[in-house]
Every structure is written in structure tokens, then in C-alpha cells.
Amino acid sequence: MVYDIVLLTAKKFLNSPTLNKYNSNVILEDNIVKDELDKLGLKTKIISWSDKNFDFTQTKLALFRTIWDYFDRFIEFKIWLEKVKNQTILINSYQTINWNMDKHYLLDLQNNGINIPESIFIHKGEKINFQEIFKNKKFNEIVIKPTVSGAARNTFRLSKSNYQQKEKLIINLLKTQDFIIQPFIKSITSFGEISIMLINGEYTHSVIKKAKKGDYRVQDDHGGSVELFIPTKEQINFAIKTYNACNPKPLYARVDIIIDNNQKLAISEIELIEPEFWYRFNKLSATKIAKSIKSKYF
């Protein structure tokens, strides 16, 4: 084989992308992980997952990193995934990727005792009645988003008084994809969202993400901020409990935790495909994942 491991990214982050702060951080973090793997004597390369000229039989491993376009190219990604699973070893595994790419996985976590916000799934082609949802669930505000999504794409915060403004758009989007509805979590704007990073189920570091004033989206590409955060023992244990509810166990996991409207810890998401891991805040975490890969596969 030509390579021991390739790190998977999106095409837009290769070939001299515009070096704004967002892109610069993507490139920095991919290279932090690559450097740690290189130090262990592994032959590595950063490539786009969709590179049609790359032969995946020529690498032993493929590590999912920053494939932040797969949800916009989902059909293409699914075809690629089914093909590449037979050509190389995927990290995280094919089973994990396939499970985690659709937010229906939240129901599996709930069934395993993990607290999630109340969730209503609207299936592709199904009719939606916002008026009944607000009335029956007694929600004041909701967030609705596709079950396959990222970076807050097609995500809407709606209330009883303004849902009509987006109703036609959402009805049209429902023709081709499933959606999830959850109550708007008030602590998102007052406190933020905690991300806890785990490797092999062990805590490495944590950040807190906060939306910019007047917004609720914590992602940095929507103007959100991120800083190191020292979680409580309860928060770390909750993240580990969520990790342990996964089958199979992933090598890496980012557990996004919120304080729900009942003031209890809840899972916003568990990111097992292409999480921003903030290695730049804790390079020892990159060392840990590199050593874990080396010891398990070589």
C-alpha cells in the first residue's frame, strides 16, 4: 500500500482555499493530526473524500476528519461510502458512520437511557401541521431542521406567531427529506452548548460554544464563539454514558451537551463522523488519537 492512513476532508479545503479564519482553522487542525501520525512513522496524506482519482485500496485506513460537504451531497456520499467500506478500514467504522449520519439515532440513545430534548420526527412526504404541534405540545418556540444536516443548514427557529413565514419553504423541503422538531432550548442563548471530546471513551478536553448576540446558532461559521471549558464531573460522566450507549464503540466522539428546559443535562448531538474536535486547544488529544490508531492497527 502507498499510505498507512489518509485523512478525509472536503474538496473546498484543498487546493489553496480562501484563507479566512474558518478555513485556516480547518487546515490547521487537519495538519495537527497529520503531524502526530507522521511522528509515529506512518505514511499519511490529506485528501478529499470525493477525489475520484484516489484509489482507496492503496491506503490501509481512512480517518474521517472535515468532510463538511457530505450533507449537501448526501446521495453521492452514500454511494461513495458503500463502495469505500470494502476498500479500506474506516475510522470511525462504517457501522458508526451509517448510524450517526441521520438524527434518528437520538431515539436509539433515548432508548438506552440518555436524556434528549423532546423530539418529533416528520418523515419525507408527510404533512405537517404547525398549529397542532404548538397546541398539543404546548411549545412556545421550536427548532426544526433536517435529520441529515450540518452547520445549521435549513435550520429554523419558529414561534406560534411567525411559523407561517417559513411554512411553505419547509413543506417544500419535506418533499425530499425528513425533519426533526424540538422545543427551543432557552439555555442555548443564555449559557451555550458544551462539547466534550472523548477518545476511546476517555475525556480529553472540552469547549463551550456560544451564539453571537441576537442569534441561536453556536457554529463559528454563523458568528458563534468557542473557548476552552472545564466541565463538571457530572457533565463528563454524562458524556461517557452517552458514548457507552453507542454500539459499536467509536474511536473518537464529540458529545454536545445542553441544559434542557427542565434544567437537566441533555444531548444535543453526538458527533461521530466529522466533528470539529478543537485539537488546537489541546494538542495532546491529537497525540492520543494518533497513538490509539498506531496501537490498534499497526
Image (tube, rainbow, N blue to C red):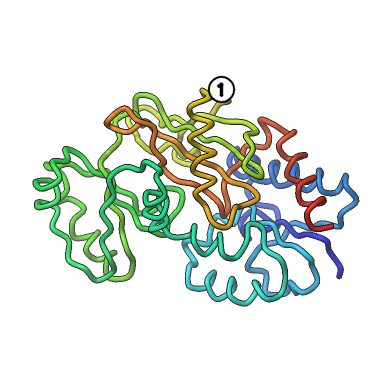
Q: Would you place residue 3 above or below residue 190 in this image?
A: below
Q: Would you place residue 258 above or below residue 244 in this image?
A: above
283 or 266: nearer the eye?
Answer: 266
Dividing the picture into quarters, in which one does residue 298 lie?
Answer: bottom right
Q: Name which residue lies at 80% across and 45% down.
A: 291
Whole-percent x, y for residue 19 in the image: 64, 43
Label 1 sits on what residue type?
Answer: Ile
> Are there few (<14), some (14-19), or many (20+) residues within 10 Å of tag 1?
few
Q: Would you place residue 149 above or below residue 116 in this image?
A: below
111 or 185: nearer the eye?
Answer: 111
Whole-percent x, y for residue 24 in the image: 65, 41
Q: Name which residue lies at 63% across and 68% down.
A: 50
Q: Would you place residue 231 above or below residue 163 in this image?
A: above
Q: Is residue 39 left or right of residue 226?
A: right
Q: Secondary structure at mark 1?
A: loop
User: Circle 1 sits on which residue?
Assistant: 230
Q: Name which residue lies at 69% across and 31% down.
A: 282
Whole-percent x, y for residue 228 in the image: 58, 25
Q: Is residue 273 left or right of residue 288?
A: left
Q: Locate the N terminus and report the quarter of the image it occupies.
A: bottom right
Count of numbered circles on the image: 1
Q: Name which residue lies at 38% across and 37% down.
A: 266
Q: Is residue 205 left or right of residue 169?
A: right
Outermost residue, front side: 112
Dividing the picture into quarters, in which one does residue 9 lie?
Answer: bottom right
Whole-percent x, y for residue 108 in the image: 41, 55
